[in-house]
């Protein structure tokens, strides 16, 4: 299945405005600028679980609506920026009506989870809210599903694996069916569900390790500008051809996750990655400030990781990858990799 689409939003309103004016009328873009400023004020000081400013989520929701779904309705777009005001700030529905009108406020109200009243539990209120969404009008669903897609499109960045799993399960059960309201959303959520399916169980196979690696490296590129996941998949293929066991192939898929992404060894264990694989990933991860030779010598103390490292070096040294680099970089890396092989050979007693 094709990889999922990411809606990153924009770095600031200036960048957003340029793109939005190409999609919308100048008047609509101007009205959205006012709504964004208001939203930033209401959400001042708030951050998302991964630590980014809250307004980035709001711009992502707007990005889905305007770019992914071609929405032109200013009230719906404005609600994308304001959808969490009542639920997560001191702003009220009356404030929204006064500043942006009843249509915008009504859309925000439709996606706002009600407060828990006496005699109710948080779970009961949420269950009732989700059931009500299933009967909601199309515009409300477009708004809520855009919000949800922003929340889950980078689900792997949430610091707690338990939350990743619960978000995945709820999204598959409750929101993927609702996405049939629009073919574009339907495809987005189906691709998303496939890409994050490793969260449905332990990451204890080559297939699930590959999907985890693809998620963690999704927006990364290598020195030549190619998707980074192509490198770890290439290293895993070489390891397999060189006789790697299943756990070593898994380690090849995951060998750069801790060094080059926000993932930690603890998170790998929480995801159900087997201990021998985590140990190899640990060995393959260069510590901050660690010299290259110290790293390689330490790595050899985990013998199962040596085959993976050799596959990593072999793939990095392949003519197809080297040819994408400038001559000076090629020469520097060629010497680096040749030296690494010599160190590994000396440490393991392999002298050809």
Image: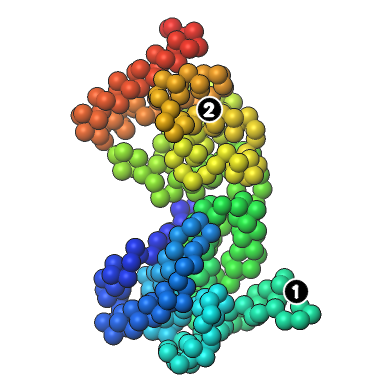
Image point (55%, 74%), residue name:
88
Label of residue 121 in the image: 1
151 left or right of 319 in image: right
In this rendering, position of residue 172 left or right of residue 224: right
- Where residue 42 sits: x, y (%)? 46, 77
Residue 251 location, quadrant? top right
Residue 69 visible in rendering: no
Query: Which color mode does the image show?
Result: rainbow
Classify mark 1: helix, strand or loop: loop
Measured along the vertical axis of the image, is residue 156 above or below residue 179? above
Residue 137 image-quadrant placement: bottom right
Instruction: Provide the residue designation for mark 2.
Output: 283
Of 52 and 246, the residue lying toward us: 52
Residue pushed farthest front? Answer: 45
Tell me the CA gap for discs 2 and 1. 46 Å
Q: Residue furthest left?
A: 327
Is 229 placed above or below 67 here?
A: above
Q: Classify residue 278 by image quadrant.
A: top right
Classify mark 2: helix, strand or loop: helix
Q: Is residue 296 visible?
A: yes
Residue at x 45%, y 24% (from the top left corner) = 295
Mark 2 residue crowding within 10 angstroms, few (<14) / some (14–19) / many (20+):
many
C-beta proximity under 8 Å, tags 2 and 1: no
Q: Position of residue 77 (x, y in %)?
A: 41, 79
Q: 70 or 292: nearer the eye?
A: 292
In the figure, 211 relative to 46: above or below?
above
- Residue at the right extreme? 119
Tally of numbered discs? 2
Residue 125 in the image: state x and y as whole percent.
Answer: 70, 76
Picture residue at 45% right of the left edge, 10% below the top: 346
Counting residues from the start of the chain, the first of labels 2 and 1 encountered is: 1
């Amino acid at each position: 299945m094709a990889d999922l689409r990411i809606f990153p939003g924009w770095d600031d309103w200036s960048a957003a405005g340029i793109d939005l004016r190409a999609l919308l009328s100048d008047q609509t873009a101007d009205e959205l600028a006012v709504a964004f400023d208001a939203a930033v004020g209401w959400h001042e000081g708030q951050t998302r679980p991964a630590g980014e400013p809250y307004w980035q989520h709001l711009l992502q929701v707007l990005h889905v609506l305007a770019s992914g779904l071609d929405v032109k309705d200013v009230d719906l777009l404005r609600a994308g920026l304001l959808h969490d005001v009542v639920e997560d700030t001191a702003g009220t529905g009356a404030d929204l009506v006064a500043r942006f009108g009843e249509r915008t406020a009504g859309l925000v109200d439709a996606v706002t989870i009600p407060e828990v009243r006496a005699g109710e539990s948080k779970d009961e209120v949420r269950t009732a809210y989700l059931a009500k969404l299933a009967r909601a009008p199309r515009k409300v669903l477009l708004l809520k599903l855009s919000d949800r897609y922003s929340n889950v499109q980078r689900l792997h960045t949430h610091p707690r694996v338990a939350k990743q799993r619960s978000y995945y399960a709820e999204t598959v059960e409750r929101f993927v069916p609702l996405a049939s309201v629009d073919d574009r959303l339907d495809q987005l959520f189906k691709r998303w569900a496939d890409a994050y399916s490793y969260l449905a169980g332990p990451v204890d196979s080559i297939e699930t390790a590959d999907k985890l690696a693809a998620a963690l490296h999704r927006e990364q590129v290598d020195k030549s500008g190619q998707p980074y996941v192509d490198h770890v998949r290439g290293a895993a293929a070489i390891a397999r051809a060189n006789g790697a066991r299943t756990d070593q192939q898994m380690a090849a898929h995951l060998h750069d996750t801790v060094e080059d992404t926000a993932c930690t060894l603890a998170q790998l264990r929480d995801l159900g990655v087997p201990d021998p694989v985590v140990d190899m990933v640990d060995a393959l991860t260069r510590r901050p400030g660690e010299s290259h030779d110290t790293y390689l010598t330490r790595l050899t103390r985990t013998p199962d990781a040596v085959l993976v490292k050799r596959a990593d070096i072999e793939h990095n040294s392949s003519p197809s990858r080297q040819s994408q680099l400038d001559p000076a970089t090629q020469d520097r890396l060629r010497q680096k990799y040749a030296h690494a092989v010599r160190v590994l050979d000396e440490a393991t007693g392999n002298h050809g």
